[in-house]
Image: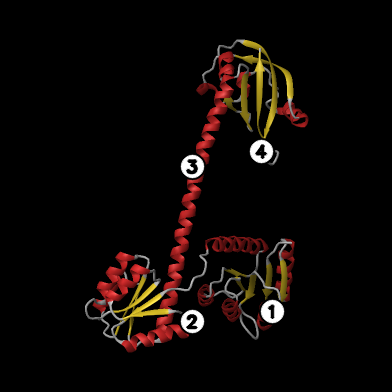
Amino acid sequence: MAGERILVIDDEEIICTLLKDTLTDAEYQVETVTNGIEGLEKLFKGEPFDILITDIRMPKKDGIQVLKEAKNRVPDIITIIITGYPSIETIREASEYNAFDYITKPLDPDEICECIKRSIEVRKLSRELRVPEKPPRILIVDDMQSALFLSEGILQDEGYHAEIAQNGLEVLDRLKQKHFDIVVADLHMPGMDGIELLNNIKKLDIKTLVIIMTARPSIESAILSFRHGAYDYITKPIDPDTIINTIQRGLEKRHIEINTDKLLRRLHDLRQQMINENASLVKEKDLANSTIDATPDAIIATDEHANICIINHAARELLGYRKEEILGKSVDTLFAEKKNFFKGTDLELMLKEGNVYNYSLTCITNKGTKIKTTWSGAPILDKDEKIKGVVGIGRK
């Protein structure tokens, strides 16, 4: 059995049965329930589930509520919404709570299986890219002691650890000693205001997110803050929900940037690996071609349509053709016989026996001269044992 456990919640028994049969056949472990309350109880107790598939319209507790509670308790679970009553509102809500997909009824079993397969691949990549969790470093700077203590208390209540500073110079000294993920800076401070501090922070560490706060908001100062690279602009008096939500969004943005950098490095490494492998393949191909050309016997290879794709130097000398004159032409161009082991019934016989030895054929040169030759050959098969051509070695 596949390791993924799937919970299906739908008040229609026929949908539960369809999904259970389909996904069990696909080697997933599937459990079904017919209401949201029972579904959440099953989700939060016992062995964990990897994937949640839930309908939207259900009695007792609808699918969006189920999605919200599931994500709050099990953030890593893959969630897929199914519904017979799609709407823009529920699409937006599903997206807001990070549902992986939104599928409308009637359900296509193949679509469901493909969606699950994609979701598992996406989660696998996400886990590979995930940066080990570290407590975020937050620095608050304000020349007013009361504002500092208030901000610090709000963040501590939310579980964050924050340091405080009373002026811009103190902030710059701290930044030279260690990295901060977020700096929350007052706009109006003596000596060095928030905009000047913002510019200096970006020079020291461009990845530090700076949130500007002010008791005297204006369109001009907001534009100026964003123009100089502020992540956000909030106003005093400080609202706990506003500052917490702003910091959470900032940390999510930072997390995405780190993952993007990691993914770009991975893509660069893969590209370099492909370049190196391609260079190696080119060398191997050149070596193989040199070996084939150096062989004293005539060598001809065809593709699956019996067209010539390789002809070595000895074969060209024997038949009087230049490479560009014969590549891509039918193998019949070279032989007087309508039947030969490069195609047809003799090819079928060769496939059964594996190889052909000492097969007599009459070659026709570029001048029309006929030459008696003897050939040995073998089929060229792909990884699925399907014929992709034939290679033959001949001599007079």
Quarter placement of the N terminus: bottom right
Question: Alpha-carbon distance for marks 2 and 1?
Answer: 26 Å
* Numbered tag placed on residue 292 in the rendering: none
Of mark 2 and mark 3, the one earlier in the sequence is 2
Q: Are marks 4 and 3 in contact (CB under 8 Å)?
A: no
* Numbered tag placed on residue 45 in the rendering: 1
Q: Establish if 324 lies above or below 280.
A: above
Q: Establish if 339 lies above or below 131.
A: above
Q: Are marks 4 and 1 in contact (CB under 8 Å)?
A: no
Instruction: Report x, y in % for residue 57.
Output: 62, 80
Instruction: Report x, y in % for residue 375.
Output: 69, 19
Of mark 2 and mark 1, the one earlier in the sequence is 1
Instruction: Report x, y in % for residue 328.
Output: 56, 27
Kind of residue at disc 4: Asp
Circle 4 SS class: loop
Kind of residue at disc 3: Ile
Residue on which disc 4 sits: 382
Q: Quadrant of residue 56?
A: bottom right
* Numbered tag placed on residue 275 in the rendering: 3
Question: Alpha-carbon distance for marks 4 and 1?
Answer: 49 Å
Residue on which disc 2 sits: 159
Instruction: Report x, y in % for residue 154.
Output: 42, 86
Kind of residue at disc 1: Lys
Circle 1 SS class: loop
Q: Quadrant of residue 54?
A: bottom right
